[in-house]
C-alpha cells in the first residue's frame, strides 16, 4: 500500500525534483523546483524560504532487550523516516561517539540533561528512545530524520538525524536552514566541527546557512544567557513559530509505546514509519483548514499588537524613540555576560529609585526657601505618611475584628492614641502653611469622623480648587501635587516589582516544591506577598484620589487612572526575560505600563518602559512576518498539490502499465486536484488580504482553483 501510494511502482517523472518518495513530506515547506523557484523571489522576500526544522527526543518509545530472529529486517529500512540502520549503527559505535563529552568543555547551561547518559540505568532495554526531526511550522515528520537511542540522547545520534534531514532538504536546491532543539545552546556551538567528522557521503555544503534557537516551552528551564541568545521571540524573520516540532507528534505515537516496546527491531521501525506517515497524511488533508484558521488568528493578533505598540510608542518622547529605533537588537557580549535590548537589567530598579530620590530632594530644596511657608514640603510629606499609618491601623482592626483578644484590643487602643496625638500636632501646624482656610469643603472628601482613624489631615486636596485660589494657596496645592505624583509613581513601580516577583515565585513553587509541608510554607509566603500588593494598591489609590481632587494638570486623569483589580497584571519578563515563553505574541500590557495619552517626561518612567517598548515592537514585527509566512505556506501548498496532481496525471497516461494502475493514478490526480481546490477556496481571500503584502505570493497565486500557479 505504501509503495503504491508513493508512485514508485510507476515510471519516474522526467523532472528529477518531482521524485517519488515513500514517506510523505511537508507540502507547505520550501521545495526548490516543486513549490517555488529561487529566481521568482526578490531580495527583500528571500528570507521566507528558510526551512525551519525541529528535533526532539522521545524516551517512551523504547524497545525491550529480547532475542531477535536472524532474518529480522525492516521493509522500510532507509526508505521512510528512520535512517538506514547499518551505516547508522556503524557510526554510533565509533569510540569517539561513545563519550558523553568529546570536546572536554562543560556547557554554560546544564539545566537540561538531555545530552547525558541518563537512561543507562534502565536495565533490560535495547533501545532507550528515539529522536525525530519535523518541520517547525507544520509539525510534519521529515524523511530520514528519525534514529534510535541506545544510551541516552547523545550528540552523535541527533547529529546524524539532523544532517541526514538537511541533506534530503537541499538535494534539489540550496536553502537556508533554521533549527530548534531543546539543548540548542550547547549542541550548536560545536555542531560544525562534529559534522566535519561524518563520512564523505554525509558532508554538509560549506556555504550552508544555519541559524537556530531553543523551543519556547523549553526555554523557561534554561539559564539567563540562553534566554538572551536563543529566544525565538527575539529573532527576526522567524514569524511566530514555537519550535517544539515533534512534541505534538509524540502524543499519538506514545499511545502505541507499549506494543512497540515488544516488537522486533525491524517490525518496530516499520510500525513507527507507518504511524508517522499516517500523522503526515492527516496534516496534508487538513492543511487548508489549518492555514486559514492560523491566518485569521494571526491577523487579529497583529492588529491588536499594532494598537498596543502605537499607544506605547506615543507615550515615549521623540528624542528617546529615535535612539531606541537605531539600537541594534542582536545579543552582544560585554563585561563578561550576554545582553540585549529585550533584557531587563538587574540594576534598573535601583536606578529608578535613585532618580526619584534626587527629584524629590530637588523639590524639597525649591520649596524650602525662606518664607512664611518654610517647611511646607516636610509638612505635606508627613501628612502622606500619616495617611499610611491610618490605613495600616484600619487594616489591623479589620483583620482582628472577629477574634480579637483583650491584649490585642489594648495594643490597638494604645496605637490609636499615639496616632491621634500625631494627627493633632499635624493639624495644629495647618495654620502656619494654610492660614485662614477653614474646614475642608471638598464634596468628594470623606466627612470628618469622631474617631482618630478617620480624622481629617487638612491637606490642600481636602478643599475645593476655588477655595484654595481664594486664599492664595496655589503654591501649597502645587507642592502637594508634586508629592502625590511621586507617591503614585512609587506605588506603581512597587506594584511592577511585586507583580513580577509574584510570577517568578509561583513558577518556582510549581517547579521545585512538593509535599504538604513545603507547599504550605510557600503558600504562606505568597499570602504575605499578596498583602504587599494590596498595600501598594491602597498607597496608589490614596494619592490618586487626592490628585483628582486637586485638578492641577489636565493630563493627570489620563496619566494616572483608577487602579482596578483587572489592571494589576504582571508585565511578563520585566524582572527577567520571561517573554521568551510561548504566548508572548498575544500579550498586552496593562495601563500601569502604558497609556495612549501618557507623555513620559520622567526619566525613570521612560527607562522602565524601555524593555517593553522593544518587546512590543518585536511582537508587531513577528506577527507581520507570520502573516507573510502564512501567505507563503498557502502558495507553496497550492503548488505542491498542483505538482502532485500533474505528476499522477502523467503517470496515468504512460504506456505499458498493469491493469488498474492507470485508473489508480488518475484517481490520485483527481484527489490532489480536490485538495488544491479546497485550499484555494479557503485561502484565496487571505492571500489577497492587504493587511500585509507578500509580492511573491500575490504575483503567482492562481486566478482560480483550476488555473495553474506554476508557469
Image: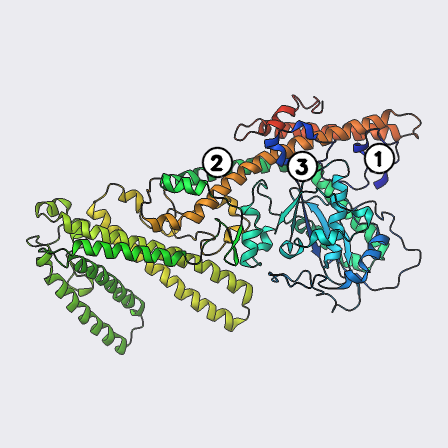
Q: Secondary structure at mark 1?
A: loop
What is the CA distance from the residue labelled 1 to the residue labelled 2? Answer: 45 Å
Select label 3 or label 1 by which is in front: 1
What is the CA distance from the residue labelled 3 to the residue labelled 1? Answer: 22 Å
Residue 705 spot, x, y in % from top left? 68, 24
Q: Which residue is mark 1?
A: 7
Does residue 618 appear anywhere in the picture?
Answer: yes
Q: Which residue appears at 51% of the width and 45% of the height? A: 329
Is residue 690 found left or right of 315 in the rendered image? right
Q: Secondary structure at mark 2?
A: helix
Q: Which residue is mark 2?
A: 303
**Of residues 355 and 407, the one drawn nearer to the viewer in this rendering:** 355
Q: Is residue 225 above or below residue 651?
A: below
* Among the 4 quarters of the image, the one containing residue 93: bottom right
Residue 680 spot, x, y in % from top left? 65, 28
Estimate how packed mark 2 is, as few (under 14), some (14 to 19) or many (20 or more) residues with alpha carbons within 10 Å: some
Q: Which residue appears at 73% of the width and 42% of the height? A: 280
Q: Secondary structure at mark 3?
A: helix
Residue 336 spot, x, y in % from top left? 52, 59
Q: Which residue is mark 3?
A: 287
Residue 335 marker: none
Picture quarter with the N terminus? top right
Amino acid at each position: 500500500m505504501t509503495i503504491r501510494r508513493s508512485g514508485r511502482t510507476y515510471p519516474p517523472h522526467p523532472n528529477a525534483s518531482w521524485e517519488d518518495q515513500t514517506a510523505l513530506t511537508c507540502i507547505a515547506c520550501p521545495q526548490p523546483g516543486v513549490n517555488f523557484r529561487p529566481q521568482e523571489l526578490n531580495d527583500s522576500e528571500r528570507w521566507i524560504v528558510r526551512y525551519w526544522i525541529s528535533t526532539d527526543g522521545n524516551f517512551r518509545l523504547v524497545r525491550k532487550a529480547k532475542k531477535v530472529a536472524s532474518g529480522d529486517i525492516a521493509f522500510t529500512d532507509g526508505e521512510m523516516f528512520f535512517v538506514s540502520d547499518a551505516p547508522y549503527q556503524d557510526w554510533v559505535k565509533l569510540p569517539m561517539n561513545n563519550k558523553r563529552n568529546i570536546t572536554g568543555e562543560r556547557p554554560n547551561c546544564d539545566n537540561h540533561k538531555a545530552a547525558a547518559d541518563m537512561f543507562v540505568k534502565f536495565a533490560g532495554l535495547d533501545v532507550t528512545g528515539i529522536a525525530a526531526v519535523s518541520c517547525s511550522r507544520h509539525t510534519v515528520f521529515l524523511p530520514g530524520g528519525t534514529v534510535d537511542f541506545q544510551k541516552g540522547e547523545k550528540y552523535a545520534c541527533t547529529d546524524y538525524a539532523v544532517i541526514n534531514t538537511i541533506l534530503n532538504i537541499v538535494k534539489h536546491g540550496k536553502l537556508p536552514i533554521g533549527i530548534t532543539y531543546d539543548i540548542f545552546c550547547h549542541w550548536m556551538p560545536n555542531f560544525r566541527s562534529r559534522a566535519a567528522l561524518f563520512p564523505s557521503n554525509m558532508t554538509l555544503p560549506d556555504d550552508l546557512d544555519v541559524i537556530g534557537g531553543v523551543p519556547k516551552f523549553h526555554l523557561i528551564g534554561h539559564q539567563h544567557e540562553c534566554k538572551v541568545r536563543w529566544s525565538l521571540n527575539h529573532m527576526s524573520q522567524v514569524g511566530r513559530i514555537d519550535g517544539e516540532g515533534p512534541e505534538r507528534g509524540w502524543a499519538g505515537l506514545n499511545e502505541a509505546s507499549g506494543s512497540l516496546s515488544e516488537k522486533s527491531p525491524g517490525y518496530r521501525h516499520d510500525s513507527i514509519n507507518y504511524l508517522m506517515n499516517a500523522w503526515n497524511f492527516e496534516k496534508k488533508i487538513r492543511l487548508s483548514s489549518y492555514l486559514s484558521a492560523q491566518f485569521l488568528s494571526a491577523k487579529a493578533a497583529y492588529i491588536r499588537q499594532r494598537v498596543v505598540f502605537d499607544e506605547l510608542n506615543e507615550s515615549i518622547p521623540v528624542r528617546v524613540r529615535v535612539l531606541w529605533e537605531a539600537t541594534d537588537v542582536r545579543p552582544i557580549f560585554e563585561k563578561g555576560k550576554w545582553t540585549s535590548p529585550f533584557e531587563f537589567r538587574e540594576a534598573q530598579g535601583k536606578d529608578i529609585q535613585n532618580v526619584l530620590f534626587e527629584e524629590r530632594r530637588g523639590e524639597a530644596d525649591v520649596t524650602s526657601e525662606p518664607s512664611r511657608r518654610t517647611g511646607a514640603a516636610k509638612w505635606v510629606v508627613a501628612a502622606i505618611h500619616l495617611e499610611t499609618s491610618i490605613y495600616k491601623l484600619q487594616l489591623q482592626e479589620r483583620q482582628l475584628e472577629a477574634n480579637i483578644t483583650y491584649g490585642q484590643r489594648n495594643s490597638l487602643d494604645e496605637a490609636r492614641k499615639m496616632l491621634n496625638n500625631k494627627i493633632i500636632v499635624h493639624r495644629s501646624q495647618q495654620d502656619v502653611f494654610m492660614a485662614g482656610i477653614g474646614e475642608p469643603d471638598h464634596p468628594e472628601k470623606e466627612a470628618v469622623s469622631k474617631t482618630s482613624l478617620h480624622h481629617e489631615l487638612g491637606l490642600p486636596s481636602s478643599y475645593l480648587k476655588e477655595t484654595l485660589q481664594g486664599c492664595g494657596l496655589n503654591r501649597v496645592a502645587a507642592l502637594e501635587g508634586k508629592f502625590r505624583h511621586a507617591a503614585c509613581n512609587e506605588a506603581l513601580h512597587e506594584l511592577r516589582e511585586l507583580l513580577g516577583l509574584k510570577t517568578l515565585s509561583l513558577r518556582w513553587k510549581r517547579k521545585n516544591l512538593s509535599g504538604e509541608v513545603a507547599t504550605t510554607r510557600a503558600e504562606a509566603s505568597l499570602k504575605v506577598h499578596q498583602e504587599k500588593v494590596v498595600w501598594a494598591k491602597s498607597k496608589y489609590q490614596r494619592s490618586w484620589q487626592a490628585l483628582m481632587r486637586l485638578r492641577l494638570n489636565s493630563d493627570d486623569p489620563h496619566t494616572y487612572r483608577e487602579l482596578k483589580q483587572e489592571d494589576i497584571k504582571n508585565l511578563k519578563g520585566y524582572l527577567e526575560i520571561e517573554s521568551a515563553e510561548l504566548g508572548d505574541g498575544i500579550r498586552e500590557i496593562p495601563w500601569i505600563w502604558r497609556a495612549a495619552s501618557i507623555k513620559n517626561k520622567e526619566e525613570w518612567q521612560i527607562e522602565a518602559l524601555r524593555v517593553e517598548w522593544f518587546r512590543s515592537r518585536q511582537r508587531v514585527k513577528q506577527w507581520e512576518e507570520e502573516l507573510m509566512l502564512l501567505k507563503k505556506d498557502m502558495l507553496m501548498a497550492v503548488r505542491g498539490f498542483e505538482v502532485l496532481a500533474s505528476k499522477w496525471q502523467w503517470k496515468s497516461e504512460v504506456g505499458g502499465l498493469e491493469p488498474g494502475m492507470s485508473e489508480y493514478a488518475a484517481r490520485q490526480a483527481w484527489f490532489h486536484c480536490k485538495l488544491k481546490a479546497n485550499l484555494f477556496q479557503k485561502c484565496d481571500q487571505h492571500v489577497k488580504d492587504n493587511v500585509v503584502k507578500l509580492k511573491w505570493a500575490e504575483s503567482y497565486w492562481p486566478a482560480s482553483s483550476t488555473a495553474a500557479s506554476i508557469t
